[in-house]
Amino acid sequence: MSPISRGFLGRRHPVDDPSRVPPGQYVTTDFPVLSAGPTPHTPLEEWTFEIAGAVDQPASWSWDEFLALPAETPTVDIHCVTKWSKLDTSWKGVSVDTLLERAGTEAKWVTAFCDGGYTTNLGLDDVSGGKAWVAYEFGGAPLEPEHGGPARLLVPHLYFWKSAKWVRGLRFTPADVPGFWENYGYHNHGDPWLEQRYQGD
Amino acid sequence: MVELVDQTPRTKSLVLDVPDWKGHRAGQHVDVRLTAEDGYQAQRSYSIASGPEDDKLVLTVERLDDGEVSPYLVDVLQPGDELELRGPIGGYFVWEESLGGPLLLIAGGSGIVPFRAMLRHGIATGSDVPLRLLYSSRALDEVIYRDELREAGNANGVDIELTLTRDAPSDWNGRRGRIDEQMLDEVAWAPAEQPLIYACGPTGLVESVADTLVMAGHDQGRIRLERFGPTGT
Amino acid sequence: MIVESLDGNAIAGQLFEVFGSEMTAVTGRCRFCGASSHLAELRVYMRAPGAVGRCPACMRVVLVLTSVHGNARLDASGFELSA
């Protein structure tokens, strides 16, 4: 049994509406930087976003082409598996629905792949129906490299390790292929409301 | 928790009485864990500042403004409070007298903490291993253990050099500016002397020091590094 | 805010928990590039969902430490530890 540290509260923020906070989470006003490796720095002239794999019509956009796509400005709550949640975060990005408009696929699974080699797996229904974006602005400014810039996946209804930083594309697969953290014991789906942090949860 | 000692405006030393403490080696650290009443926990590592021959365990903590653990340790903890520790931990970034030297220690900011333990060990054992310490701080009032280091530098075979990177008093006789190739060239022993080299502090400083020394011909195998997380910048 | 890039010293306590002994001075070989290093010399990225250790020479992931329901779990399949 750990002794109680008299007067220790931690950096947690009081919450007005507890129903917005999934079980086991604490609200923060910071934006902690969590990373599995060094920050990549791909020059924008070389950057592309791809829809690839088991699709009828693979697609690829350059940075300029990507910025020309219709964009949305979602405000969402985000939840990290390391227990912090951040409410009312504002982003700008392209809805994944827009990116998939012409893809044509029967595959139900997607792997997000990124600069630096990170991957995460998602179901098609987790990235469609207005649930996911490829975001390039945060808080009204270009997304900083440490937070995944130039662009990251944004899938707020799942734990934030699924919102892959430095995303470069979505590859459709006929079967579900566990990504980086999923391979090391994290939950395949990752629903914070069901506290799906680890495999078997 | 026995006593709190102010070191600089942002750092404090915690003097601890640890029942059944089995001793430690200079350079090791402990993991400190805090538990709130509702069970919430946070944990951080802190290098041991006391030498193995000292009778109480001392940790020196730098208060980070946006820290979670350090503000508690520096602002809230009082004598009589309990602290949960795990350790001592570490077997790589350690020095003892029997390892010999000459010993070159390079510190940035709070990276000085494990070197205080090494210095005190050298002094307590009456070691004749030559020791040089190059310590980079932003300003004079941020130099941790300033008086103690000055006194240690008076001894034969112990050479303490400070460099201030941001502000120096007008009558400052010490070095100025960041640790660079020229400064290392002036302070370090020649590679032929085969010094044991330890560097500790922010990752950027530690890596650039290591790269510079290797390029100057020092044996990579005689250089040991410990990178610290964010320190106040 | 910069990414915290540390080294194996930062996970010494967790490694002790997993192995039951001090591990940072242990050497091993990266299975990808063959470079030898002490565990303390791995480049470690902390505060991710787990701690990720990368070979200092090739920067590939050789070790991942996670804490699943309070139990430390290590996957060191990329790093061949010396006896």
Image (cartoon, rainbow, N blue to C red):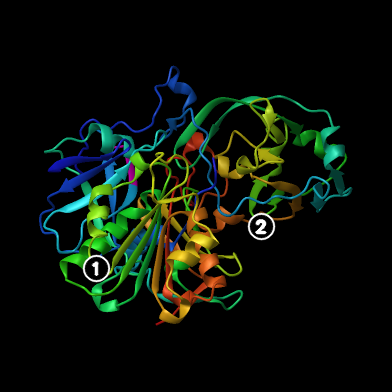
| Magenta span | B39-43
Residue density around tag 1, few if under 14, some if 14–19, many if 20 or more, within 10 Å: few
Q: Which quadrant: the C terminus of chain C?
A: bottom left
Q: Secondary structure at mark 2?
A: loop
Q: In the rendered image of this protein, does residue B212 appear above or below residue A41?
A: below
Q: Is residue B208 magenta?
A: no
Residue marked by disc 2: A117
**Which corner quadrant of the image does residue B53 belong to?**
bottom left
Pinpoint residue C12: horizontal percent, then vertical percent.
36, 62
Q: Amino acid at mark 1?
A: Asn
Out of A80 and B147, give the one closest to the viewer.
B147
Q: Chain of mark 2?
A: A
Instruction: Residue at 71%, 35% (x, y): give it.
Output: A135
Instruction: Residue at 47%, 41% (x, y): give it.
Output: B166
Pinpoint residue A179: horizontal percent, then vertical percent.
62, 55
Residue density around tag 2, few if under 14, some if 14–19, many if 20 or more, within 10 Å: some
Residue marked by disc 1: B156
